[in-house]
Image (cartoon, rainbow, N blue to C red):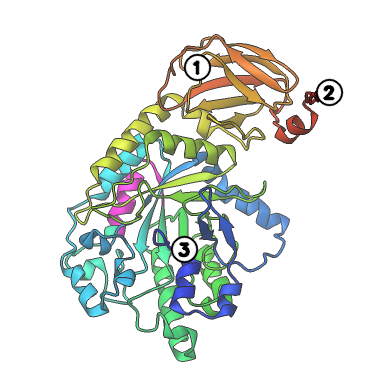
Amino acid sequence: MEREGLTRREYLQWAGVGATALAASAVGASCGGVKQERAITEKPAEPSPAEVANRARRMKWWHEAKFGMFVHWGLYSVLGRHEWAMEVEGIPVAEYEQLAKRFKPQPNAARAWAKLAKQAGMKYMVMTSKHHEGFCLFDTKLTDYCAPQQAAGRDLVKEYFEAARGEGLRAGLYYSLMDWHHPDGARCLTDEAARRRFVDYIHGHVREICSNYGKLDVLWYDVNWPLDVKGWESEKMNKMVFELEPDTIVNNRNGLPGDFSTPEQHIEAEKEGRAWETCMTMNDSWGYHQADDNWKTPKAILRNLARCAGGGGNYLLNIGPKPDGSIPDESVRILTAVGQWMAKYGATIYESERSKVTSSLFAEFTRAGNTLYMHVHYWPGSTVALGGLRTKVLNARLLTTSQKVDFKQEEFRVQFTGLPEKAPDNLATVIEIECDGEPVQDEEWVRKERPRRGVGISA
């Protein structure tokens, strides 16, 4: 993943990558105005009807899941200073390798992750099999720089799959194409013999993780620096993946469009018909960072989850386990609170479809058929108003108590009245609004058509 405070595009510019490579980058703005680079992709060919049907079949569970757990774990957790420490601090490879002798996780640490994910209402998990540092958590025949052949002494990916499946969760793997450890990881850009060796090494890893652990539900590529689609032989790579795992789902970060897009650290809905998943940290780091105390609140996480679901996307929320595999206390506290809310109101997330109502100063929206769910995070008091709703409201109720809610619908707004002065649910109070058709909001219509008052001019 990107290091916090520096986008991948900015990093490549700083590192001296040529203008040709940068020109291939597509950049979008995050909610907070910080630019984040999207995956570099080739213009996709129009899929055939058979391909469309096959993708719909493979992704059915994923669209229903809505909420997943990302797990970033590796040698960087021993340092506890961010997953990009090796690169940003300029740590020599030989020095960094010594961390493998100190990385000795407790047995079956992944069981606690999977139990917490299930408790939080998450339906799938994605764990790093190899991050940019180059250390493999899985058993591989291609290098001894892997957990089974170092101090850990065992296959940590195997333990992860057993834990996730034991809790009834879907399980996927993250794999970084960029590699700071492999001797050909940078020179592959200018040396064809190095590129051949490095691409064979990467493809060999992908083959292993698609072959050795049973069903792989998601393959989550990351960072295709420094090669392009042709250099990585990405078409060949994906063909191999689907031959080995016909039901897997792949993302768009090996340079091809893949099955879904991956906005990072911000929520950016794709056009209808294109699957997408926002991945996000709980603080400002993907890996364990002992000093990073900028934790998101449970309320903020539920707002993000509702916004993703309302936009037709998924939310992949990260934990960064400590070197022994234990979960930071704050992550446990936050996800426990989220899970308590999801146990009551999760249906408003899981059963939702893309919503055409999106705008409020204090709420997010999900939809199921003609029913709109208004997730009020900042409770305004006894009256809750929604502007620009063009669909007739038939009735409304508070989900927490099933109390009927009175409403008054005018041309430009609907007001829900007689509500408690204090929020019935501190994290998010849900108002269920039944309409006579699919709920549609039009803010521009309000701006243009709402009558305006004249301006008085004194004589």
Alpha-carbon neighbours of circle 2 within 10 Å: few (<14), some, or many (≥20)? few
Judging by the rendered image, the residue that carries numbered circle 2 is 459
Residue 433, by quadrant, is: top right
* Disc with the residue nearer the chain's start (2 vs 1): 1
Secondary structure type for disc 1: loop
For the N terminus, the quadrant is: bottom left
Secondary structure type for disc 2: loop
Q: Position of residue 309 (x, y in %)?
A: 54, 38
Q: Which amino acid type is shown beneath numbered disc 3?
A: Thr
Relative horizontal placement of residue 286, taking residue 441 as reference (left or right): left
Up-down relation of residue 411 to residue 139 (above or below): above
Q: Which mark is residue 155?
A: none
Q: Nearer the viewer, mark 3 or mark 2?
A: 2
Relative horizontal placement of residue 456, taking residue 279 as reference (left or right): right
Residue 166 highlighted magenta (yes or no): yes
Q: CA distance from mark 1 to mark 3?
A: 40 Å
Up-down relation of residue 387 to residue 56 (above or below): above
Judging by the rendered image, the residue that carries numbered circle 1 is 381
Residue 457 highlighted magenta (yes or no): no
User: Range of the magenta residues?
Assistant: 157-171
Q: Position of residue 330 (x, y in %)?
A: 27, 41
- Tell whether label 1 touches label 2 (CB within 8 Å): no
* Disc with the residue nearer the chain's start (3 vs 2): 3
Judging by the rendered image, the residue that carries numbered circle 3 is 7
Residue at 58%, 68% in the rendered image: 25
- Viewer can see residue 225: no
In this view, the residue in front, 213 or 287, is 287
Dominant secondary structure (helix, strand or loop) of the stretch shown in magenta: helix
Residue at 21%, 61% in the rendered image: 78
